Amino acid sequence: MTAGTSTTGSLSARLLDLAAASAPVFGQALHQHADASLAELLANLAPPPAAPAQPRDDLWQVLHAELSLEHGSSHAARAIESLRADPVLLTANHLGIDTFADSVQGTMLLALRAAAAGKPLVLLGFGSISMNNLTYPMGLRLYQPRDPALSCFPQRLPVLPNRIRHCMVSHAPPFDRSMVVRARRRVQQMTGEKQLTPRYAEAANEILAADFDDDAVLALPRYRDQAAVVNRRLWRRAVPHAPDAAPSVLHIETVCTKLLTADLADPGTLAHVLLFDPAVRERLLHTLDGAPACWNLDALIRHLKGDRAGPTGGTVFFWGVAASGKRIPLTVLDGELTGTDDTGLRWSIPFTPAAVIEALREDRLIPSLFLSFTTLAFARAVTCVGGYYQVAYLPVMQRGVVNALSAGADLRRLAESVAAVPTTTCLSGLQCLARATPAGLLPVGPVELAAAGGLAKAQQEALFQVRVRDACLVAFVEVLGDLVPAGQLPPGWASLLAAELGNTPLTTVVC
């Protein structure tokens, strides 16, 4: 699609209002930038960085080491030079095979913009989420509609077996050739049932044959290693004219673990104060009890006692790692960090800096979402560019930390540093690419781009001229159901919106 004046009808306006009411931060951004181009939005995406409570030098050292492993020291040095000047990291993604149109397109915008300025894009992906998360790292999301009503949209093509759906992405076992063979048979079946067009099926089969069923990929020891290679190959298919612009994806929990093994040994760091100052920790635990993406203390105790009927209650500070690769929700009780694994066995370590550091180094503990953002954003004032979920929970976490620090008479300066960190920087729910179909405009992921022969060079420039309002509306076909409670959405809204957007000027692909 190309930039221009959008034609939005009453349904579009109603859905924009519903999204704004359900996600106020989203509504505020839309109010401020609706008529701006994506280029203008990106130019003003992140506010000026805050002064960090702790020096960032150790973060740059860790990132340099991690980047050097994958891309070499020269690439790492360029990335760190860019981050020193502008300490902004994308934290909206998960650590798995990514065919989720919303995250793929957001990443594409930032990566192409960074490449135009001669800078590598560094992206931190979360691996502590389960394999059954909404991005569907267990296989491919296919944005080929089965019917005009968009039922079962997008379709899912599984590669990994359902039995590993509760494993953490970072600890999932690798896929093998037999799994890929089954996926290819499924493509053949879907084509025969006219769920996929022949051209689309050919692209999906090519990806499975060349990018999954490759000896070098199948020999990798972990799923996360395979996912990193597959994602780079999907990028080259989707953006063939800018193969070197692919983002560098690092495991956020690995980065934070390396920082925390030093932080927790130093009583002057934010993480040590929050976890091991008894008054501060007690205030923090109760301030964020029940907060989104944090913990529920009563539910954790019930889970610890064997009640598996309700939710586990998140986790306090860390996840334990079960032998099965699943997460163990933990709480602090009687001087121990404790929980029960998926078999009902008790898991405990002393809640002391030395014991926690040892467990981190042995991969028996991994930092929670809260502790990861505490380490990066609150302690080192890195602006974390997240999705619409992050901008809902990160400011709440920030207020909780500031409140907890008020329990210490000498912690005022630390609290002021945390309070100054930007926590509402978001890049989600924006799709600058769409697929023109008889049903209207539909989302586009890497499989669709591959089927279309990749993003043409001329189209790359046009992406940045799309208006923010139009990009939001196209994304709604995929993400609005996550933003707005289902009961508030009109019947058949997705297919009606796709049809209404048929006249919206966007960059379209044909496949």
Image: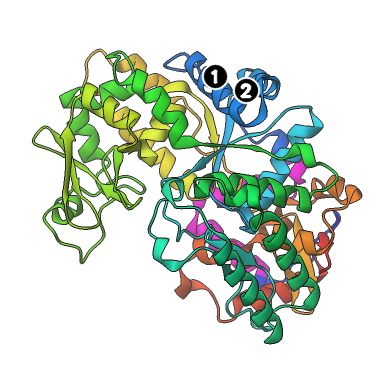
Residue 24 vertical placement versus 61 (above, below): below
Q: Is residue 505 visible?
A: no
Which amino acid, by three-letter code, is at mark 1? Trp
Among all residues in the image, which is located at the extreme left?
334
Q: Position of residue 277 (x, y in %)?
A: 20, 22
Callout 2, which amino acid?
A: Leu
> Considering the numbered disc 2 on the image, is that residue within a helix, a strand or a loop?
helix
SS category of the residue bearing label 1: helix
Label total for image:
2
Magenta stretch containing residue 466, yes or no? no
Q: Position of residue 244 (x, y in %)?
A: 77, 37
Whether residue 262 is visible to the viewer of this picture, yes or no, is: yes
Any magenta on residue 37?
yes
Circle 2 residue:
83
- Is 406 drawn above or below residue 476 in the view shown? above
Q: Main secondary structure of the magenta part?
A: helix
Q: Is residue 363 left or right of residue 388?
A: left
Which residue ends up furthest to the bottom in the rendered image? 193
Q: Quadrant of the N terminus?
A: bottom right
User: Quadrant of residue 81 in the image?
Assistant: top right
Q: Is residue 436 left or right of residue 287?
A: right
Q: Earlier in the sequence, mark 2 or mark 1?
A: 1
User: From which residue to which does the magenta span run?
Assistant: 12-40
Tell which tag, 2 or 1, sits nearer the viewer. Answer: 1
Q: Position of residue 188 (x, y in %)?
A: 68, 78
Q: Residue at x 51, y 31 (%)?
A: 422
Residue assigned mark 1: 60
- Give the camera-side residue of 78 and 418: 78
